[in-house]
Amino acid sequence: MYENRKRKHYTPPSTTGTTASHPLSRNMQPPPTTATTSKKTLTLTPSRLKDLLIILSFLIIIYLLFSSPRPQLSLTPRTTPSTTYLTTRRHIVFSIASSSTSFIHRQPYIRLWYNPTTTRAFAFLDREVVDPTGNNNRSVIDPTLPPVIISKDTSSFPYTFKGGLKSAIRVARVVKEVVELNEPDVDWFVFGDDDTVFFVENLVTVLSKYDHNGWFYVGSNSESYSQNVKNSFEMGFGGGGFAISYSLAKVLARVLDSCLVRYAHLYGSDARIFSCLAELGVGLSHEPGFHQVDMRGDLFGMLSAHPLSPLVSLHHLDAVNPIFPKMSKTQALEHLFNGVNVDPARILQQTVCYDPVYSLTVSVAWGYSVQVFEGNEFLPDLLTPQRTFMPWRRGGSAEFTRFMFNIREYPRDPCKRPLVFFMESVTNGGKNGIWSNYIRHDVADCNRGYAMKNLELVRVLSQKLEPDIEQMKAPRRQCCELSPLFNGSMFISIRKCGADELIAMHS
Ligand SMILES: *[C@@H]1O[C@H](CO)[C@@H](O)[C@H](O)[C@H]1NC(C)=O
Ligand SMILES: *[C@@H]1O[C@H](CO)[C@@H](O)[C@H](O)[C@H]1NC(C)=O
């Protein structure tokens, strides 16, 4: 029944106060013409014409007297053209691939992004969770977590990948099982692991670029070159999560079982979904905000140079250091969400400004870090992640150390590195803007220049970044301005760049 639902294109609420049919409405028919038929029945004698003119002018006068001032017809293009699709949090159904043993341990990650009143999600487990006495007992699960579904038996499917996990088939079939729940009003099905952290508002924004009535498979490949060689550069990696539009998911669910038997030799569930979608003739729409995070150690270099696309997901957070210093992994993520909850679209977005007085270069990754470099740094260099992290696989050939993006070396000598500040707090001042504060993080006692020596705090003022889908299709980095250093503090104001403004050093 849900295939027939009619909610399709986004029609923004009328701003003119009238309830009249929208000028762009595709259903509007031209008024029927009666001129040709009236010619045959009416003979226009001069006196009749006179009467007609009198009646007509009378009607015009009545109209002018009683009609209220008409709203001005705008000739500028509508702000939300018909290529934008209204997807909200409620139109996305998440499926979390988990198991009865890992679900309990991964609860803190799921709690970060899942809210039982605003998010729709199901956790697919291999079997019931047990309480300490060994009994099947779901009451050990936090009731604010997504409802649990026990996956169907997949033992009849073949699995031949040596050293792999047969659960890959169970997890691939989550796509079929979630579709068969027949949930109402679904635009997108989104799949992730129990250690995938989603940034749901940004996911909504990114998916709104695509027509959920079409067949779309949206996600990202791995950061690791060798992982992509092994799987495919065109595969949506399951840990970073991927989205399948409603209509595509319906078809995939119907054909999945017949397809799975052909891919017994593959390792993971995501490779199976990728292969079956390929059989349906569908390829991946790459979105750089999904992060499989096939890397270890310190993610600083990657997080402080995020692409212009909104941050959609982070994965493998058990395998990396806490993303903020002096915090546990979970605390650090909760801390990041202090910023995410105030301005989700701006989280990690990088802005660069130059200080002509002290010759400093400042790079802000909003809600996360600020880096202050002595001297002028070229902008493209700053947009390149620094190598603070390690490859997923240690040892082996050089191929394993290759990443899918350009990398800058991160100096071993901490005194040659930029001064780093980490987000300390974000406060929403409403119309007055959002203040985010970043405090200095020293790893060594370095001899810094005059301006940097006393700098303890960076305060950043910005306005909430309202996601505009049309702008997102052609995103532009914002500009920032530095105020003179004062009392150990630096003030930065982020704003839209001027039409032909350059983000450039002052020569
Ligand atoms: C289920 O687990 C809860 C919490 O551990 C416990 O209080 C309850 O008695 C258990 N129920 C059964 C039927 O074992
Ligand atoms: C200067 O900074 C110190 C420490 O951060 C603070 O206590 C003091 O109030 C500041 N002074 C002014 C004038 O802002």
Image (cartoon, rainbow, N blue to C red):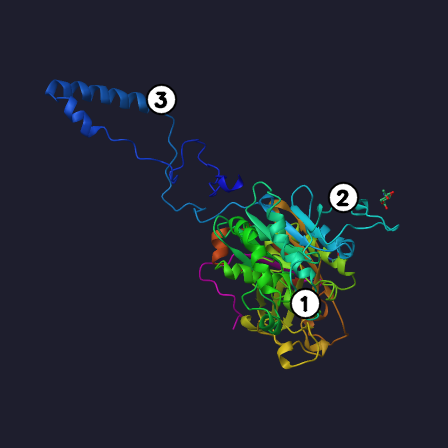
Whichever of labels 1 and 2 marks the residue nearer the N terminus, that label is 2
Instruction: Give residue 73's position: percent from left, percent from top.
Output: 36, 38
Q: Main secondary structure of the magenta part?
A: loop
Question: Can you say whether 67 is above or below 388 in the image?
Answer: above
From the viewer's side, name the closer residue of 223 and 103: 103
Residue at the spot of label 1: 300
Type of amino acid at the residue the image marks with label 1: Phe
Q: Nearer the viewer, mark 3 or mark 2?
A: 2
Q: Please, what secondary structure does the residue beneath circle 2 have? A: loop
Quadrant for residue 402, please give it.
bottom right
3 or 1: tag closer to the N-terminus: 3
Residue 66's disc number = 3
- The tag earlier along the polypeptide, 3 or 2, is 3
| Range shown magenta | 486-507
Can you see residue 232?
yes
Q: Secondary structure at mark 3?
A: helix
Residues under labels 3 and 1: Cα distance? Answer: 66 Å
In the visual, does 61 lie left or right of 141?
A: left
For disc 2, the marked residue is 143
